[in-house]
Image (tube, rainbow, N blue to C red):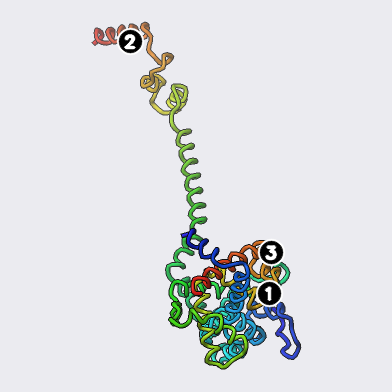
Amino acid sequence: MFGREKHREAEINPDQIAGVERLGRQIVRAAGLSDDECDRAASSPMLYARIRAQIALEQSGTTEIYGSWFGMILAAWRAIPVMAIITIIAAGLFWLVSASNKAERPRGPEVARVQSASAEGLGPVSACSISSKEECGISTEDVLATMIDRGREDSGR
Amino acid sequence: MMAEPDTGAELSDELLAAHARAGNEAAFEQLFHRHRRRIARLAGRFFIKPEKVEEIVQEVFAKMYFALGAYSAERGPSFSAWLSRITINQCYDQLRRAKRRPESTSIALDEGEGPGLGAKLRMAAAGSDVESDLVSRDLAAKLLARLNPDDRVVLTLLDSEEMPVAEIAELMGWSGSKVKVRAHRARVALRKVLVEFM
């Protein structure tokens, strides 16, 4: 392809190239309307009315687009920041509630003793009995004392 | 709110554009009447059918209306140059579409057109009768339709509009050297088209 084009170009001597270029300029100038014809086209009686009609049509087309699917996208776009704020607030409330729930849960035997001491009819032993901490555990002497007391009660009957 | 333009005084294009942008229809109409012929002549360099030129003028002013919001007299070129740029872009788009769907006149040359090409164009330049003028115009349009739209735009602005390189550069948003390079390539391309038929 390139070889053939170069061959055709080589067939034309430099003087001819100048002539071809001059012809090219003439062709470019010839390929168009005259000024009078252009003025007549620009003076067409309905031209301005058609321009206004095209503008009105494009404006109404844009409005219709905004009223339909584009309107939905626009509404969704506006809703995103609001939804994000609501999500952040909800997450913050959830975290606060979780934190306060952890604070209310019983922490250990010390808490249990304090709570049970204030409760009516309950002694510290009842609360300690559900704890696995060593300080709440019953000693051997306590067990023996309890058994001896029970034995005396049974023999007394 | 902008004051109504004084229709008696000659307002500048930039001021009328500002009024038109604010919704003043009279200002837009003044701009239309002021520039329609110039735009039509520019479009008429590229197309040989008057109805095509009308269509382009219509498109240009409709586009101008919607683009007024983006135009700034302080930042950008003059209103006239800005409107010319819109026109050239519109012509370029039409040329590209025509390249895909040629105009009603076929781009293929008739049998007798090739050999007498130079003679016919010389007759048209000498201002001979209308019929041969139309034949030459049609022939020239067929030959230029074989060029790329970019090449055709550059050659038309240089040779038909006789614009200087600097003005073309400003109009197209190119550098001066880019205009020259494109012009050289376009001339080579046109030469190849002519050699093919001579």
Type of amino acid under label 1: Met
Of marks 3 and 2, the one in the foreground: 3
Question: For mark 3, what is the residue?
Answer: B176
Q: Position of residue B52 (x, y in %)?
A: 51, 83
Q: Residues within 10 Å of mark 1 (few under 14, many from 20)?
A: some
Task: Give the structural element (helix, strand or loop) at label 1.
Answer: loop
Q: Nearer the viewer, residue A128 or A133?
A: A133
Circle 2 sits on which residue? Answer: A146
Disc number at residue A11?
Answer: none
Query: Looking at this view, is A49 or B153 the one in front?
Result: B153
Location of the C terminus of chain A (image quadrant): top left
Give the distance between the C-alpha atoms of the residues marked 3 and 1, in whole angstroms: 12 Å
Q: Classify B5 as above or below A5.
A: below
Q: Which residue is mark 1?
A: B163
Instruction: Identify the amino acid type marked 2.
Output: Thr
| Residue B172 pos. (x, y %) | 63, 68
Camera-nearest residue between B148 and A48 = B148
Of the residues under marks 3 and 1, which one precedes in the sequence?
1
Q: Identify the element where label 3 is drawn.
A: helix
Could you tell me the amino acid type at mark 3?
Answer: Gly
Question: Which chain contains the residue that carries disc 2?
Answer: A
Q: Mark 1 and mark 2, same subunit?
A: no
Q: Quadrant of residue B175?
A: bottom right
Q: Chain of mark 1?
A: B
Q: Residues within 10 Å of mark 3 (few under 14, many from 20)?
A: some
Residue B21 visible (yes or no): yes
Residue B86 appearing in the image: no
